[in-house]
Amino acid sequence: MGSILIVESDPDTSDAWSAAMNEAGHAVLLAPTMREALAVVRDGGIDVVVIDAYQHQISPRDSRSGIVELARGIESLPDAPPIVLVSSSPNAPEVSARIGAATFLPKPCETSELLAAIGDVLGRLRPVRMVHDSEPIFPLELPPLELPIDGPAADVPASPVEIDDEPTGQMSFG
C-alpha cells in the first residue's frame, strides 16, 4: 500500500487513524507537530501526508501559520508527497486550495472516508510498471478500435503490398 505520515497532536485520534491504516496495509508514521512532520518528510519515503489541522493552526491569510509553513516545506522537496487535509475549521476549504492539498475532508469524518481519500490519492500516484529504470508508464484508456465492415474501407484490399513470385523478389504495390 503506502507510507502515510499522520500529523496529529491528539494521541487518541492519531492512534485510531494509525490502527485503521495499519489494518488496511499502510505503513504509518506519526508526528504530533508541524515541525516534526517536516523533519520526517525531509527524510523521504512518505507517500501521503495526512494533516489534522485545528482552527488555531489555520489562517488563509497568514503565511506564517503552521499549516502553510509545513505545506511550503513539503512543496519545496523534489519528491513532495501529496497532502490530505482534515479539519473542522471554517477556513479549511480555502486553506486546502491555497496549499495545494490533494484532497480535503471536513471533520467530523469517518475513518473509512479518510482511508478512501488516501486510496484515491495513492491511486493517482501509482504507475502500472516501470521501464528503463525510472520512466513510469501510466495506463491509457483508449476507446475500442472499430473497423467499418462496409463502405469505402471495405473496398481496400487486405494487403496493399504484394510480393511478386518471380525470382527477382520485386515488390509491386497494388
Image (cartoon, helix red, strand yellow):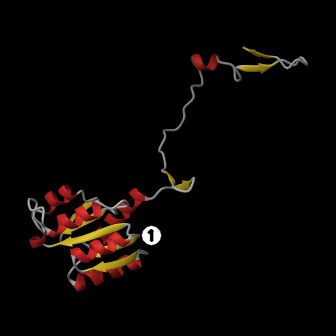
Q: Nearer the viewer, residue 58 or 132?
A: 132
> Can you say whether 11 is above or below 117 in the image?
below
The part of the image, by quadrant, that contains residue 126 is: bottom left
The part of the image, by quadrant, that contains residue 95 is: bottom left
Q: In this image, 142 relative to 95: left or right?
A: right
Is residue 134 at all visible to an observer of this figure? yes
Q: Residue at x 58, y 16 (%)?
A: 152
Q: Residue at x 21, y 58 (%)?
A: 99
Q: Amino acid at mark 1?
A: Met
Q: Which residue is mark 1?
A: 1
Q: Residue at x 37, y 77 (%)?
A: 28
Q: In this image, 18 relative to 166: left or right?
A: left
Q: Nearer the viewer, residue 106 or 82?
A: 82
> Can you say whether 83 is above or below 151 in the image?
below
Residue 74 location, x and y as percent? Answer: 28, 64
Q: Residues within 10 Å of mark 1 (few under 14, many from 20)?
A: few
SS under mark 1? loop
The part of the image, by quadrant, that contains residue 53 is: bottom left
**The N terminus: image quadrant:** bottom left
Q: Residue at x 40, y 72 (%)?
A: 3
Q: Nearer the viewer, residue 25 or 101?
A: 101
